[in-house]
Amino acid sequence: MKYSLGNIQYFWPKQTVESFYQSAIDSDVDIVYLGESVCSKRREMRLKDYLYIANELTKANKQVVLSTMVLLEAPSELNELKKYCDNGDFLVEANDISAIQLLTERKLPFVAGSALNLYNHHALKLLTEQGMVRWCIPVELSRDRLKNIVYQCEKTNIRHKFEIEVTSFGHLPLAFSARCFTARSENRPKDDCQLCCINYPNGRLTQSQEGESLFVLNGIQTMSGYCYNLSGEQQNMQGLVDIMRVLPESEEAFHIISQLKQGNSLYSETHHSNGYWHQIPGLSTAL
């Protein structure tokens, strides 16, 4: 089993991001994803900054993957996507079909991100033919569904062509919209958001009238209200999953990866969930 660090989902100041990845150099992580996947207005970090960090991480024997935007809304965003695909050194995580098209045209291998709607072996077969070398499963896919897809991939002799990665810890990205919910929460229009999401380094929590955590608002992204935690499922992942991904909320992510590598389960006073993995409501916890 390998352990990866997903790209930062939130809008952090440049100094915070650089400090975070400096810590990644000395961490136990095997794979590091870099890049902005949520909102193109977040320009504290540019591609050249990520490429510099990528080279430093590579020197520390970490595999680096550049993550692309999930929702493209302007020609400038397409131009930036092309720069990611043309980086020349690093594997790219495609979070949108347009990224797959560009990478396929360039005959480059790629990671299929969890935002892509890939739910059967037919889709995976098509993408392996186009260059997919890793599939990060949709966050709501259960173990049983995954097991069945893997079985079909083995029958069609494509399972050996790609790795399977599962988002295993962190607030899950559930949906993306053309609206910016963080700006709306401050009564700002999206076009004049004043980059207010930088004031919420872990997003804005929304709760039900009963006080239950429902969602975390993060710009145009809606995330799970509870932290997803599959640390207790590692034994059930053996032979099925190649990589466990941790989504960074803070530098605590490196401790989490270290504990996962030791086979430890992670629990805290904060409510965690693992419902999707067990094919029950996502905010639930199966014992």
Image (spheres, grey):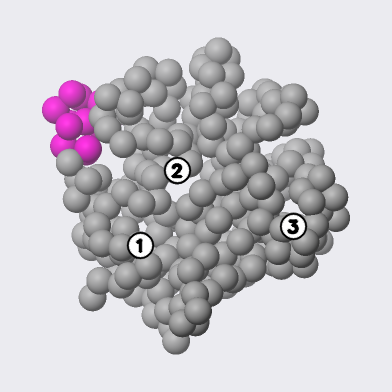
Determine the residue located farthest toward the bottom in the rendered image.
269
Disc 3 residue type (three-letter):
Ala
The residue shown at (36%, 52%) is 140
Q: Residue at x 70, y 26 (%)?
A: 78
Asked whether residue 85 is drawn in magenta, I would say no
Q: Which residue is mark 3?
A: 183
Say which element carries label 3.
helix
**Apparent side of residue 20 relative to residue 132 in the rendered image (left or right):** right
Sequence-wise, which precedes: disc 3 or disc 2?
2
Type of amino acid under label 1: Gly
Q: Nearer the viewer, mark 1 or mark 2?
A: 1
Residue 77 coordinates in the image, percent (x, y)? 72, 31
17, 211: nearer the viewer:
211
| Total labels drawn | 3
In the image, 269: left or right of 73? left
Q: Residue at x 81, y 45 (%)?
A: 191
**Which residues are the magenta region?**
149-160
Query: Secondary structure beneath disc 1?
Result: loop
Give the secondary structure at mark 2: loop
In this rendering, the answer to whether 270 lies above or below 97 is below
Q: Position of residue 120 (x, y in %)?
A: 27, 33
- For the question of whether residue 26 can be seen, the reply is no
Q: Is residue 135 left or right of residue 182?
A: left
- Gap in angstroms between the C-alphas marked 3 and 1: 26 Å
Residue 156 magenta: yes
Q: Residue tagged by mark 1?
A: 282
> In the image, is residue 108 above or below residue 89?
above
Q: Can you identify the residue that label 2 sits on?
A: 114
